[in-house]
Amino acid sequence: MSRNPNLTPLPGSCAACTVRPFALFRVIPQARVGEIARIRSGVRLVRAGDAIMDGVFTMYAGWAFTWTATNDGRRQILDFHLPGDLVERTEDAAEVEALTDSSFCILSKERLCAFMGNDPGLALSYVEGLTRDRARMRERLTSLGRRDAAGRVAHLLLELHGRLLRRGGGDARGAAVPLKQAHLADALGLSVEHANRALAALRKDGIATLNKGRLEILNRHELEDLAGWTGHPPSSSSLAPQTMTG
Amino acid sequence: MSRNPNLTPLPGSCAACTVRPFALFRVIPQARVGEIARIRSGVRLVRAGDAIMDGVFTMYAGWAFTWTATNDGRRQILDFHLPGDLVERTEDAAEVEALTDSSFCILSKERLCAFMGNDPGLALSYVEGLTRDRARMRERLTSLGRRDAAGRVAHLLLELHGRLLRRGGGDARGAAVPLKQAHLADALGLSVEHANRALAALRKDGIATLNKGRLEILNRHELEDLAGWTGHPPSSSSLAPQTMTG
DNA sequence: CGATACCTTGATCGATCTCAATGTCGGTGG
DNA sequence: CCACCGACATTGAGATCGATCAAGGTATCG
């Protein structure tokens, strides 16, 4: 591992937190931000490749992913976690791993629960996050069930690009996407070799490239076409408030 | 469709509702059940094959499923809904369809939201349902990503069997499962013909059969083995209360 | 009895996997 | 500076799984 890891420390105060506008606590008005300090139970800096054992946390910097091992020792990546995302590591088979050097803010499950009991807005914010997670899983399911390799790759790249844009990362041309081809493959149910070939096809046709941790979108129209992109709005809950994050 | 549809009417009162122990409102104590009547905005009986256009509802009898159409006109089934399940039909691309003649209880989104604002327990019950949905999507994702056709079929049959058992349907030997092979195929990313062959293999090996709306499990051990079954507990949220439904 | 919906089977095709090299690039020790 | 190494990325050839296409078969219902 690098001698100079890129470990971004968190601010001491939630008031200064740069990801709060995209995170669970976005619904807490600035004047009451002090109250949520009690919910925090610590911060953590981890290296790329490290397993994360904490229960509930908010990504502050870096990428992480949740995965599960299959019978035969292969890996299925279930979701990627970006700054601002609330992540729960549960006791069942799913593991959480830092994809890059990352930092995050650990929450106390009990105190969060208690706080939500008094603040229905916070509970609904939590609901909104879960609903979005579910919608993302459904999109992914559609990819794995009914799209070919190029379509799956295209769809995932668009999903990640959209999520990054919404939190102010990258621009219409591209964004920082630190995935290795093995991550793509394990998220999309492909072999690494085939993920490579799908990416090579996108590159050859001048549609998109993924290189050295950077996604470049060269022809958004064709990329969407390949992906069968429907451009759903990010929120898809009839119950969740419409705060347009994700 | 049949001249004598099997349309089960709902009881007039929530107090008499037989699915409440498995449903969103399970957390409301018997003494306060009267209060939730205001949240109900009606009941509906639909025929197998009908699209369901209501926004938020609880399945009372029958099966439904959520699906989405792909670019090329194929269908991906995203989830199956059993009695007691809370279902949200949103404006985005996902459709909800009755798989059998079904009846359900329509909820008012606004009043449900308002009620959750005063009853954090209800909000957490909602969260528990969403968390379980997400966990199910993740399992399905693992199936589509990393299991072969027989494994996918085996896994889905075990999932449905477990869900049915938990609400008192069927027994260890089997249960009523009204899926056609086309539903299996569209949920699992297979062609109908291949779903048929996978099912035929299970039958030939004396592992399980699915016939005339009935699932028979002949060799649970081998079925689990094929599925890569891990037997996770039904609840997998660190935040949700542990009420063991699903 | 015919129609319809669903299930089953066979043959062939094609996408993707597997296995086996080879290439590339940044870092590291000499 | 250079040789080497490890982590990734790339490419090719052959094997497989599952899709597609094309028939039948079966059961139910009017």
Image (cartoon, coloured by chain):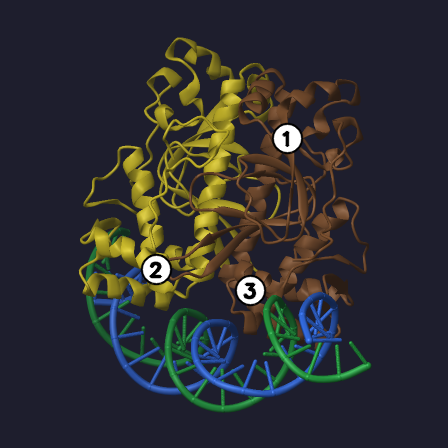
Chain colours: A brown, B yellow, C blue, D green
Can residue B114 be seen here? The reply is: yes
Up the image or down, B173 lies above or below A115; here it is below
Locate residue B153, reporting x and y percent.
Answer: 34, 57
Q: Which mark is residue B151?
A: 2
Identify which residue, A166 or B214, lies in the foreground: A166
Q: For mark 1, give the secondary structure.
A: strand
Image-quadrant location for residue B62 = top left
Report whether B97 appears left or right of A34. left
Disc 3 residue type?
A: Ala
Up the image or down, A172 lies above or below B55; here it is below
Disc 2 crowd, CA 10 A, few/some/many (<14, 14-19, 20+): many
Identify which residue, A185 or B68, lies in the foreground: A185
Disc 3 crowd, CA 10 A, few/some/many (<14, 14-19, 20+): many
Which residue: 62% across, 45% down? B92
- Give the total of numbered labels: 3
Residue that label 3 marks: A185
